[in-house]
Amino acid sequence: MSDTPEHIVIVGAGAAGLMAARELARAGKRVTMLEARDRCGGRIHPLSAAEFGYPADAGAEFVHGEAPVTRALAREAGLMVRTIGGAQWSFDGTTFSRENPRDPHDGALHAAVKDLTDDLTVADFLRRHFAGPDHARLRHAVERMVEGYDAADPERASMLALRDEWMNEGHQAQARIDGGYGALIDFLAGACRKSGAAIHLGAVVTAIEENGSKAVVRCAGGAVQICDRVILTVPLPLLREIALSAAVRVKAAAADDIGFGSVIKILLRFTRPWWRERREDFSDMLFLLSDETIPVWWTRYPDQHPVLTGWFGGPRTAELSHLEPQGLIDAGISSLAAIFSIPREEIARGVVAAAATNWAHEPFARGAYSWATPRTRAAQERLARADGLVLLSGEALYRGRDMGTVEAALASGAETAGLILRG
């Protein structure tokens, strides 16, 4: 029996990959991480604190719901997870309102979904139960929530998954990590290295082959890793860009039954928080929803940083796919000008720092995060099997309520490591 520790190669040093690496390295496995970017974190992407006045996030920002794995890891890292309150406002093109646009219809919606047993798409559900002009406002509100919050396509998104979100009392709770998710990634990467894991940045994996009892991982530039097992943690669209063996390719095809959404995120730092000066009752504003080009904005409440973050998710982001970052920033400024009836030049003059990311353009992501279709749970079962030398892991494979989140990625990485350690 060989004393050489089992060698595991992990493709991707995002949350799932780092979590799996830490658990495996701690258990004595030889772990090599291959990350295409020049940084760890994946779709967690910290921005300069000097530029924005705090450790801002171009990618994942909020801690959603209970998130037990995230919170336990934050405690271990000595990081505070702060629950945030604040009001949600809406702008209908004429007036501002603190009313949640879905509230007047919650009773009807819950009555229609509570006994639902067979899954169907959100669009089919709305056509079946809420057709006609009387329900136009409800349909619009639900579709915008599906597109904006889940970055999903209502024509493909699972109604049962959406019901699980609605029925989860803790789902609406929002929190942030002091220091941002980047601080959590720094902690995980440090723990991996401390336990002996090797992290290679700038390593773009192009092929994974199976040669008897060994796997061969090939990178652009010619570097090769020979190992016992491979954990693939790349975002779903990138599975098509890696040459895989026939068996793994068949398995990976199940990913087509999982949705993957696009998100555009814009951060604008101003000289002062002018929105609070315009309306006293905006002092506790957290979210602001509208039908402008960039439809969702949020503040740093309860922190007082003069920063507004714009968000546009779902299939309609394709309408802005031609824009470079500066074009997205300009679209954000124009949207704020329309919402607040302020000349866009006046808003632009107050901007002291800006950043914009269209995650669909990010070459090692091709989008933001996953969402469930009616066929997703069956697909996840196939993808998460520990058969063969190549395992898949990541937020898209998480079978809990909050797939698509950092919590989902961390939990999936830990679960995949456990499959190997128990095997």
Image (cartoon, rainbow, N blue to C red):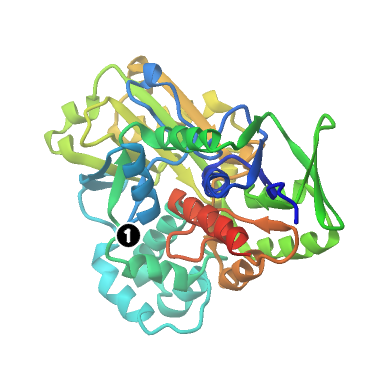
The structure residue drawn at horizontal position 51% and vertical position 54%, both measured from the top left corner, is: 414
Is 205 situated left or right of 125 in this image?
A: right
The structure residue drawn at horizontal position 65% and vertical position 43%, both measured from the top left corner, is: 30
Q: Position of residue 342 (x, y in %)?
A: 30, 26
The vertical placement of 175 against 329, above or below, is below
Answer whether residue 92 is visible to the viewer in this image: yes
Q: Position of residue 349 (x, y in %)?
A: 35, 14
The vertical placement of 57 against 345, above or below, is below
Circle count: 1
The vertical placement of 275 against 77, above or below, is above
Is 25 situated left or right of 296 in this image?
A: right
Residue sitting nearer the eye, 361 or 411: 411
The structure residue drawn at horizontal position 63% and vertical position 36%, both measured from the top left corner, is: 361
Q: Position of residue 282 (x, y in %)?
A: 18, 37
Residue sitting nearer the eye, 420 or 130: 420
The vertical placement of 136 against 303, above or below, is below
Callout 1 secondary element:
loop
Answer whether residue 152 is visible to the viewer in this image: no
User: Mark 1: which amino acid?
Assistant: His
Figure quadrant of residue 360: top right
**Residue at the left extreme?**
280
Q: Position of residue 423 (x, y in %)?
A: 63, 65
Quarter of the picture holding the N terminus: bottom right
The structure residue drawn at horizontal position 75% and vertical position 52%, both measured from the top left corner, is: 2
**Residue at the right extreme?**
211
Residue sitting nearer the eye, 160 or 183: 183
Q: Residues within 10 Å of mark 1 (few under 14, many from 20)?
A: some
Residue linked to disc 1: 171
